[in-house]
Image (cartoon, rainbow, N blue to C red):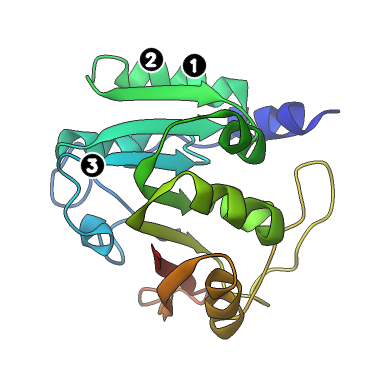
Amino acid sequence: MTLAESWDRYAVGSKPRRTTNARGETTWLNWTQYPDHGPNERVLGPVAGRSVLELGSGVGCNLAHLVTLGATGVGVDVAPARKEKARQEWGHVAGLEFRTAEATAFLADTSETFDVVLSIFGAVWFVDPEKLLPLVRARMATGGILAFSHLPPGSQAPRPGKAGMRHDHTPGEWVHILGSHGFGDADATVLAPPQGAEVATMLIRAVAS
């Protein structure tokens, strides 16, 4: 089974996102694994007029929200089923497109430059950062924002296999790794889970220097 086939199988079994959140909004950005929890798009700063790339864009809900705020967006996901679902859901939104590709292959092939790159439980967690981050930095404008989230290390053991090994690092390790690949002002925060939950979320933000 190929990498794309593995992720496609996972994608088909995923639960669809709610049509509205607790505030009654039809689009929103959620960094954590819990609904209506954690910060929103303010992590990225103003997005209007900026070009945004999401690595591991899934069905496009987070990226679509940023485009409704005035950004232009490209979503990349390795699973073909994700692109088809995203187009069904968000194909009517101008300035938004979805592509099927492995993250490093897309970054190596594209000539596009992005102001913002994000990954929510996506490619940054599953691709070796020593390979991925130099490619991300090469496609970012200086001063651009990279932000990503995933589970903290130790909260769930990495699972090897064709879907990829999770690359777990402590906040301090992420700051060091980002600094060695052209990103400054890195900040790694562990977001406490909502009441009644046990597993936290790690959110990392850095600036392309």
Q: Quadrant of the C terminus?
A: bottom left
Callout 1: few (<14), some (14-19), or many (20+) C-alpha neighbours within 10 Å? Answer: some
Residue 34 shows in this picture: no
On the image, the x and y values in percent for residue 118 come to 42, 51
Amino acid carrying label 3: it is Arg
| Element class at badge 3 | loop
On the image, the x and y values in percent for residue 69 come to 15, 40
Callout 3: few (<14), some (14-19), or many (20+) C-alpha neighbours within 10 Å? Answer: some
Residue 50: numbered disc: 3
Looking at this view, is 118 or 207 the one in front? 207
Looking at this view, is 23 or 115 the one in front? 115
| Element class at badge 2 | helix
Amino acid carrying label 2: it is Gln
* Distance between mark 1 and mark 3 Cα atoms: 25 Å
Callout 2: few (<14), some (14-19), or many (20+) C-alpha neighbours within 10 Å? Answer: few
On the image, the x and y values in percent for residue 113 come to 40, 38
Residue 88: numbered disc: 2
Dots 1, 2 in contact, CB < 8 A: yes
Q: Quadrant of the N terminus?
A: top right
Is 115 left or right of 42, judged from the image as shown?
right
Residue appearing at x 53%, y 29% in the figure:
110
Which residue is disc 1 drawn over? 84
Is 130 situated above or below 19? below
Residue 104 shows in this picture: yes
Q: Nearer the viewer, mark 1 or mark 3?
A: 3
Dots 3, 2 in contact, CB < 8 A: no
* Distance between mark 3 and mark 2 Cα atoms: 24 Å
On the image, the x and y values in percent for residue 94 come to 22, 19
